[in-house]
Image (cartoon, rainbow, N blue to C red):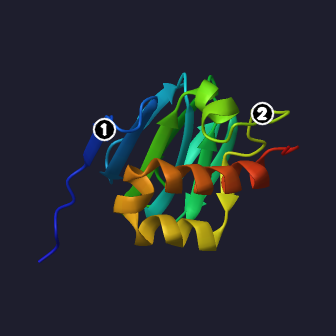
Amino acid sequence: MKSIITDKAHLWKPKALEGISLFKAQFQHFAYAKHAHDEFAIGVIERGAQRFQHKDRAYIAPSGSIITVNPGDVHDGKTATSSEYQYRMSYIRPDMILTDLYGSKFSSTYFDSPVTFDNELSKGACAVPSCYWNRIKIISLNLRRVLCRSLPVCS
């Protein structure tokens, strides 16, 4: 008997993480229309693959990919196959990335590419989701690593 996939999503704002919203979703049929966020969107594809348009360019992000979307970047999203995909995202206010998490400023505040391949980081994020998604210290360490790999200049 074939299992029926139910699209589901959950957004929450932990009290201990002021300025950060967390999101977890599993979709097979749902597709996002073009939209943008006021925050940085940073997350990982945990299972399956996502297809999306970002700044009028097509991308496919397979399992293990890290997704990074700048504030104001128009994008959409849907499954890349006939199967489901599952992902987690953090939506982080820009002022937090600039100073609050690290006490220093980046000379550039935007990601070059919306998809980064870093197996070590993405596996760590999936292996300890309760720590990664619920503790600001671990989020800040992992986020700094993603930022330093993705931004053109990291100070």
- Under circle 1, the secondary element is strand
Q: Residues within 10 Å of mark 2 (few under 14, many from 20)?
A: some
Residue type at tag 2: Lys
Q: Quadrant of residue 42?
A: top right
Q: Which mark is residue 48?
A: none
Residue 107 in the image: state x and y as whole percent: 85, 33
Q: Residue at x 65, y 37 (%)?
A: 54
Residue 95 is at least partly visible in this image: yes
Q: Relative to residue 137, is residue 130 drawn left or right?
A: left
Q: Quadrant of residue 3?
A: bottom left
User: Is 123 located above or below residue 61 in the figure?
Assistant: below
Q: Residue at x 62, y 25 (%)?
A: 95
Residue 30 in the image: state x and y as whole percent: 33, 43
User: Which of disc 2 and disc 1 is earlier in sequence?
Assistant: 1
Distance Cα–Cα, label 1 vs label 2: 28 Å
- Under circle 2, the secondary element is loop
View extreme (front): residue = 103
Front one among 52 and 125: 125
Q: Which mark is residue 105?
A: 2
Q: Relative to residue 84, is residue 142 drawn left or right?
A: right
Q: Are marks 1 and 2 in contact (CB under 8 Å)?
A: no
Residue 100 in the image: state x and y as whole percent: 61, 33
Query: Where's the C terminus, which quadrant?
Result: top right
Residue 124 in the image: state x and y as whole percent: 51, 70
Residue 84 is at least partly visible in this image: no
Q: Relative to residue 111, is residue 13 drawn left or right?
A: left
Q: Which residue is mark 1?
A: 11
User: Is 36 located above or below residue 49 in the figure?
Assistant: above
Residue type at tag 1: Leu
Number of on-image labels? 2
Q: Residues within 10 Å of mark 1 (few under 14, many from 20)?
A: few
Q: Residue at x 46, y 29 (%)?
A: 19
